[in-house]
Image (cartoon, rainbow, N blue to C red):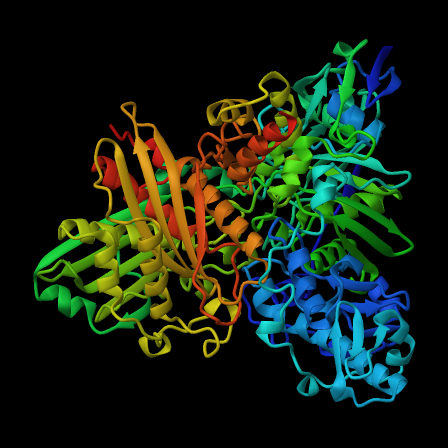
Amino acid sequence: MFIENISLNRRQFLNGVISTGAFVVASRLVPEDLFAQTAPAGAAIFNTKADTAPLHPSVYLGIEPDGTVFIVTHRSEMGTGIRTSLPLVAADELDADWSRCRIEQGVGDTRYGDQNTDGSRSIRDFYEAFRIAGASARSMLVAAAATQMNVPAAELTTANHEVVHAKSGKKAGYGSLVAAAAKLPVPKKEALAFKPKTAWKYVGKERQIYDLNNIATGKAEFGLDVYRDGMVFASVEHPPVVGGTVKSLDDKAALAVKGVSQTVTIDAPKPPLLFQSLGGVAVVANSTWAAMQGRKKLNVQWNDGPHASFTSEPFKAAMIEKVKQPAKVARNLGNVEAEFAKGGKIMEAVYYTPMAAHAAMEPPAAVADFRNGKCEVWTPTQNPQAAQDTVAAALGIDKKNVICHVTLLGGGFGRKSKPDFAAEAAVLSKKLGKPVKVIWTREDDIHHDFYHATAAVYHKAVVNGRGKPTAWLQRSVFPPIGSTFGAPAPLGFELDMGLDDTAYDIPNIRAENAGADAHVRIGWFRAVTNNFHAFAAHSFADEMAHAANRDSLEFLLDMIGPGKIIDLKAQGVDYSNYGAPIDKYPVDSRRLRRVLEVAGEKSNWGKKKPGGGWGIGIAAHRSFNTYVASVVEVEVDAQGRVRIPRIDQVADPGVVINPDRVRSQLEGGAVMGVGLAMFGEITAANGRIQQNNFDGFRVARMNDAPVQVNVHFVESGNLPTGVGEPGLPPVIAALANAIYSATGKRVREMPFSKTKLV
Amino acid sequence: MVNLTVNGKARMYDGDPDMPLLWYVRDDLRLTGTRFGCGAGLCGACTVHVDGQAVRSCQTKMSTLAGKTVLTIDALAANGAMHPVQKAWVTHNVPQCGYCQSGQIMSAAALLKTTPNPTDADIDRAMAGNICRCGTYQRIRAAIHTAAKERA
């Protein structure tokens, strides 16, 4: 038995991870050396084929003399289609033949700019960079052709991998121009001419994802599919309570399992937890199965530490009490208290959501190979630069000596931004002197997640004669994501997701928030705090509509009014706006109004009267700079079982790159939103998570999922924004509203399946 | 010693008889198309065919496979020609992350053997054991109908 201390230099970590983290606006999202024709010798951690191609005007793109175009995707593919969509943007500007483009997955490397694939911002932040990459190459090829053909560049056009001189009928294939183009300077961004929208060939058109055939035939390589010569397999028994340590270990029976070679104790992390391994005992074997079998034979006694006090039921009761008390003000418009004091009809409600697990279909896994002071890692990570940081800190080596290869991700949803599993593989490889694959079981994944926080949300309003609020107070309490990083209270970005940015036009609004203690690791889950904030706010809006006996859609449109750009700063909100500049991506309630109007048309809202167990609900929400309205239909049978025959999702995400993938994200977002709302619940007793696998933690199956999800776009011509997350929040509220419409029962707690509906 | 056929090749296995087929095809044969999702027969990601029936390979012990014929996703496309179910998956752009789709496709292919023209209810029943966390279910249903038409 060995002791390995995964200690982490917090400052190094915070500098590295948080600055590339999800919600901090990086000062320079796009790398400075984007335009560098040749990177300084030895600067790259790992050379791609784009780097080594003779013509490579960008870190994202290179062209070989045979005409092959290599496009690097530095964002992780976890099902959004980003690995295809960003290269399509570059290929379009290049006028490349898509069949001659090869996509390469970038390793973790700061030269690509931010790589933390979450926050629904890959397209938003890198659309322009990939346009530049394509346009730069095109411009250089055209300049080379002008010299070669001895014609003015202005007379040349490009199409389908060729430069064309229409007057003379001369043509030159891109490959034939590479050698000459490579000698030219890379044009300045300001000098580039982008294709007009009318000339777009790939952007806005349907396109199959690059990996489609490989997925359909089983050839796609995920993290679990990496095998290296001489590799051993490890399964890690983590402490059942966060912060727990090994009190005693008897590994005799484990070592007696055929194929098991040894056990390694990994020390518990020092706070804050960050993305460090939770520690525990690794069983190392010559196969996955042997490692798992050996692990079952371990006899480990644990020191649980203070978090053994954590039990969900009393924690919930305390949060519900706390949310009724005044808390820190995050937004203040007008004077809510003065308006309440005037009297009138007061409405109040408390909403509750439990913890949830990400439960991506591929459990966490990593292969690491440490040798000669350097470490190579293959892992399904959303954040390869954080993996570099975490591995480097765990090994006590420089980040530059960590190569993080990113495989396809079997789902991510936020969990795989946190590379604790990669650190485990790295530490074990260093200890054992050979490549190690760490495989988490589903139980490990459910027991040791960075959970979607549990929350209590309180709403209070005073309404006028038509039932419209004249003052609205909203307050949430939840254990913050910051707790994982040593921050005691919720950070601004957690409030800027549906608490302090409500876009209804109410003269007096106040938003308040308080933290709750975190006894497990809290992390970001698809759509993050929007899920519970939107559930509460748009359920409460529906409650007000029904209290006034008004149509829900008409009421929402009345609350929004004609719409406007909402100046949150003037209302005391230091709004982080998902890391996007507020002038380019304002909070615009006209767009929110528009998605609601379209949702009304597309869903035949108001045409069918609720009754006989059928009901319909609506909600709209802005998140990740994207506007989505959801209309959910439900059928509730005599046993109280909920069936969802149809959901309509109307989105305004600005320019749409690949419509099919945007639809698929909004379809999937509806399914995940439904699953989370109906069934998603993680609970703890004495610090231990009570669910183990997909029997205890239920997710939507085919027979639970909406039968039909129709996706509609609002063509706004605005800058492109994200679609990975915004599909969830409005669906959750619209589902609760539909259940009310069908049954007259107002469900204020998730999971909804716990409420008896008949 | 267990003699079996995997993807048309005769194989001999003499390891732990309790080892699930899943880890045999993945770790021993490096047929990695079959995915590990839950290890408990709850998610269907590891679905393969044994003698033509869809089974959860994570729950199928090697000791039960003497004389059996195993087909994994890796060899469902015979001689490079995609199975109608695979073709339909491509037509409908079913996958998002793709991880569960091997199991979905193997379950769907088995369904169409016994039920060549399934109704929505047949599909829901047969596919309820296969979880897709990305939520591709409606495309899976549509793709199965398309594949059924192609086979007919």
Q: Nearer the viewer, residue A358 or A105?
A: A105
Q: Nearer the viewer, residue A308 or A379?
A: A379
Which residue is located at x 36 percent, y 40 percent?
A750
* A685 to A15, vertically: above or below: above
Which residue is located at x 29 percent, y 46 percent?
A617
Which residue is located at x 54 percent, y 43 percent?
A358
Is A298 placed left or right of A287 in the picture? Answer: left
Q: Quadrant of residue A529?
A: bottom left
Q: Nearer the viewer, residue B18 or A482?
A: B18
Question: Which quadrant is home to the N terminus of chain A?
Answer: top right
* A688 to A252, vertically: above or below: below
* A610 to A294, vertically: above or below: below
Q: Position of residue A412 (x, y in %)?
A: 60, 47
Which residue is located at x 85 percent, y 71 percent?
A173
Q: Is residue A687 visible?
A: yes
* A76 to A267, vertically: above or below: below
Q: Position of residue B139 (x, y in %)?
A: 54, 39
Is A317 placed left or right of A345 in the picture? Answer: right
Q: Position of residue A279 (x, y in %)?
A: 67, 42
Question: Which quadrant is home to the C terminus of chain A?
Answer: top left
Is A292 placed left or right of A238 in the picture? Answer: right
Q: How many marks?
A: 0
Q: Is residue A502 visible?
A: no
